[in-house]
Image (cartoon, rainbow, N blue to C red):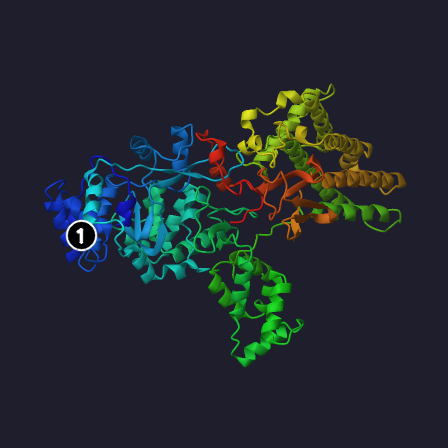
Amino acid sequence: MRVLADCVIANDYTISDGINSSIQLTGAGEQIFRDAVTARNDRIQAKEARLLCALAIGQDDLFVDIEETDIDALAVAIGKQIKDGEIRFAYEFGRYSYDAFADMFEEGQAVLSYSETQRFLDATPPGVQQYGQFVTGPFGLHRSRSVRQIHSGRRVQAFHCSDSMCDLVHRVHLTTSEMAPINAHRDRFNALLGDDDRRSVDWFGVADDIRDVPAILFSDAHVGVSATLIGDGLSEGELRQLVNHLLDATSGELRSDVAAFLQVRSAADATSTLSHAELMQVALLASERSLRQALDVLVETKAITVPLGEVRRPMVNRERRSGAFGLMPELGVHGLRFASHDEGFAMLRLRHEVSALTDMDSPEEAEELEWQIRDIDGETLAERLDTFFRVTAPSECIERLVMPRKTHVQKLAERLGVTQGLSGTDDELVARFLWKLGYPLHDEEDPRAEFWRLHERLSGLAKASHTPGSRETEEFLGTASKFFRELERYLTESLAFSAWALLHDHPADPNPFEYGLEADHARGMAFVQQAAEEVSDQVMTFDYLSDKLDLYTLIRGFEFLSKALVSFGERADEYRRPSSDVPAYARGSELKRFPFVYTVPFLNLTPRSRHRLTEQLREIARSLQRGKVTDIRNEHHHYRKTAGGVEQIESALREIEVSLRTLEAAGLSLVEFRLEDAIHDRWGRSEFYFAAPRGARHVVTRPSGYDWLGLPPLDVPQYVTPGAVFAEPNEVLRFRRRIDSPYTQLWSNYPVRRRSRSSALTQSGVEHPGAEVRHT
């Protein structure tokens, strides 16, 4: 009945004989049915009256005979009308409906008329939704092996509004036919039911109570569903891989379930022509356990490529979370997990899951646990265990209490659903457990560590050269070759990032304040190329769009960028942002400010910051040229142990160190800062302390007039640029890393903003969607 209540029908919709004959009414239902079909005025036709009784479910008594109604026949009848397009639903996975709305409407709107709804549904795939066991879709209505609730009635998330700082996907309400007889008679039928104030039983609530839905909602492990991730987070090719795996790896279960509408000999052949909606419906027929295991296997075997550091999440469906803990499915290098918006969720799960491995009623096991935490003070074992979890790093908790015993590893893996990588190293297993529990994925924290290690090693070899016989030339040559390769990588990545950070219009980007390691690197080098062409060097030309850049070209790039920044400053008025592009909140609020009045970020910085950055970039180029770094790089293969040669190398290494320390201090070296500490007082004031390798620090204070800009949340690793200050004393440009992959390609050019029909006054709300710190 929920399926039929939520669908969209056309004016000419008629109830099929199959639906009519499947529904059996109780005595109370038959009485209402007779009243409806025998009324002297506004008599209701029999088919409509019977279905209206079923849709009402009941009042004091049930109208539908639960025992006698043929559910299977009813499902077949409804499924036929879904397959024939007589009963329709919105498609809510991926960007199909989102892009169709963008193509059809220039403005955002809350409701589509009947004719607009029909055109919208014509332009989108058949809706795949799940009501308990029943999954709708292009193949009709079929039973799934898992119960899920993945539906939203006639509302579909369809567009982003015009506010560039708003990251919510707004919903649009679809309109079903009011002229179709089943809907045209609703008012008359409701009148037959009697007084609206008459007390009646909430029969849908009764059904939920039987399943104990309130308790299910508080589950921390079993309530989450992977459907929104599968629909939004996988490309169509990856979704096809998933369905192929399910058809082959579920012991014939899924093949049996689809046999009525899909002939499967070879899974790849059977799915090769299926659409995204067809693949989604087939996938949702599988059990949730099978889906989760399949995703883990496909990620582990690289059939679905998830780069290190990438976390795939639902996009248009990201507000659709499961249960009281707000669980969201996420896919990373260690597979699928369900993460909560509750900051303490991962810690609570860690404590619960690890503690559950020990039988505290067993003296032997309790004694073993007491030995493992013998360094923790406390009067009782329970007190010491509580202290242990509070003061010990999560990774160490697992290393000490889980990893020493094979049985504990196996139990925890089973409880967390870890089926892959169990033969890996201890570090790999710990990382996998932490990921499944909900902790952030920690990848390489210092991409410059190898460079500085080689710098230190090469400096040591050069100093040792003063003493004859202190080392072999071959060792120096090997270290120097690796060092200069790392230096070129360092300068290439820093130059591209510096240009992109200071010249690209971040608020207008579909992914504001996010740096894509491939796409935005290319954008940055394009800026450098433009700067080089404007300088027009008389001696040689430079190609910064090449895949291979020599050291001299890279060094000159910092010089060109510095000159370009000065040039932009001289032509600032040309880059003033149109007032219509300034967010509505900034035009109306005196408390929240929008400092990016120029489309070139560099021009929005403080005068002191602009002057300092141009000088630093120019000095980096001068310093590296002064140290003859290019000459050393080209001639190090001919190194001979002489006083002059050693002095030249030491001079070059000093200039390199000064230059790259300058880049790191300004935050332009593409090294992430991570939140180290946060302090809050009772007045609502907070200080967030960020730290980077080699001692770099930055503090962000809140509240602030600049916390609605869409900058990265304050609890995630990010590129902080202390040298790019747009408001004193410590409001600086900050960026989140974005990894380019099939997932990011799938969501490129997203969001697509629609013009607003409403005034800024309608966009009320205590918390701005673009705020950095959210209380969800």
Query: To which quarter of the image does residue 427 belong?
Result: bottom right
Q: Residue furthest bottom?
A: 363
Would you say residue 541 is visible in this rendering? no
Query: To which quarter of the image does residue 640 belong?
Result: top right
Nearer to the camera, 700 or 567:
700
Nearer to the camera, 455 or 191:
191
* Residue 75 position in % (x across, y down): 23, 50
Residue at horizontal 65 percent and vertical 35 percent from the top: 497
Secondary element at tag 1: loop
Type of amino acid at the residue the image marks with label 1: Ile
Q: How many marks?
A: 1
Decide: few, some or many residues near mark 1? Use Cα within 10 Å; few <14, some 14-19, many ≥20: many
> Eyeballing the image, is 52 above or below 250?
above
Query: To which quarter of the image does residue 108 belong?
Result: top left
Nearer to the camera, 124 or 160:
160
Residue at horizontal 82 percent and vertical 40 percent from the top: 654
> Eyeballing the image, is 351 above or below 697?
below
* Residue 561 position in % (x across, y down): 70, 28
The residue where tag 1 is placed is: 23
* Residue 725 position in % (x across, y down): 70, 36
Instruction: Determine whether, in the image, residue 46 is placed left or right of residue 395.
Output: left
Nearer to the camera, 443 or 589:
589
Would you say residue 23 is visible in this rendering? yes
Instruction: Determine whether, in the image, residue 718 is placed left or right of residue 315.
Output: right
* Residue 175 position in % (x across, y down): 31, 36
